[in-house]
Image (cartoon, rainbow, N blue to C red):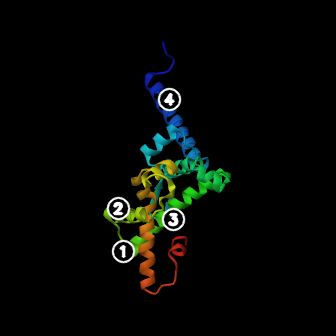
Amino acid sequence: MSFLPRWLIGIFAVVLLFLVLGFGGLSLAYGITRQQWDSPMVRRIASFVRFPAARVGPIAIPYTDYLILMDAQRTLLTTEEAKEGGFETVPEAERRRGALDALMRNAATELLAAQEGIEVTPLDVDRFYDQLVRLAPTSTGGTPQEHLQRNFGWTPKQYKKYVVRFDLLHDILSQKREQAGDQTSVDRLITQ
């Protein structure tokens, strides 16, 4: 026999559930925004919720993209090239900021290109990538795809998404400004 009516116990249970979920959500938001958590559980939640790591104008940069860049940095730091270049001595906080800055520069480049009426198709990106592969030095050992996998843990598709596309946009923007006689650099415009 219960001292409280069932409806009151039900309300108490729902309130308790909302408090637990609210506290859990706030803890997760704090961990992602302030501590940059990257545990497997956080990765699953971030991919499901599409939690933003930052915003540049109307563009929300997904936390999952930030985690992918951090993973690439960690992979790079385990290579001989990184050890020879002294990259493993870069503090973690600086590497984290660098990954977020790179994503923010990409988003700013995307915004500037949209303002200038510039669009690139996946075919344009593929052609630019093929051009880069042809120009790449062969001293890295193996194919460019093997180099990407070994040094960054990336596939060519990821490399195109996070690097090549924005390099192409940057080049087009620079050429357009040069043809118009505008001396303002694209880098300066996207950091404003």
- Taking the view exactly as shown, the residue that stands out farthest to the bottom is 181
Secondary structure at numbered mark 2: helix
Q: Which mark is residue 12?
A: 4
Q: CA distance from mark 2 to mark 3?
A: 21 Å
Residue 150 circle label: none
Q: Tell me the SS state at disc 1.
A: loop
Q: Which residue is mark 2?
A: 126
36 vs 108: above or below: above
Real-space Cα distance between discs 4 and 3? 48 Å
- Front one among 28 and 78: 78
Circles 3, 1 touching at the beta carbon (< 8 Å): no
Residue 59 location, quadrant: bottom left
Instruction: Give the x, y percent position of residue 129.
Output: 39, 62
From the image, tell me which residue sits under label 3. Answer: 105
Mark 4 or 2, nearer chain start: 4
* Above/below status of 119 relative to 160: below
Is residue 67 visible in the rendered image? The answer is: no
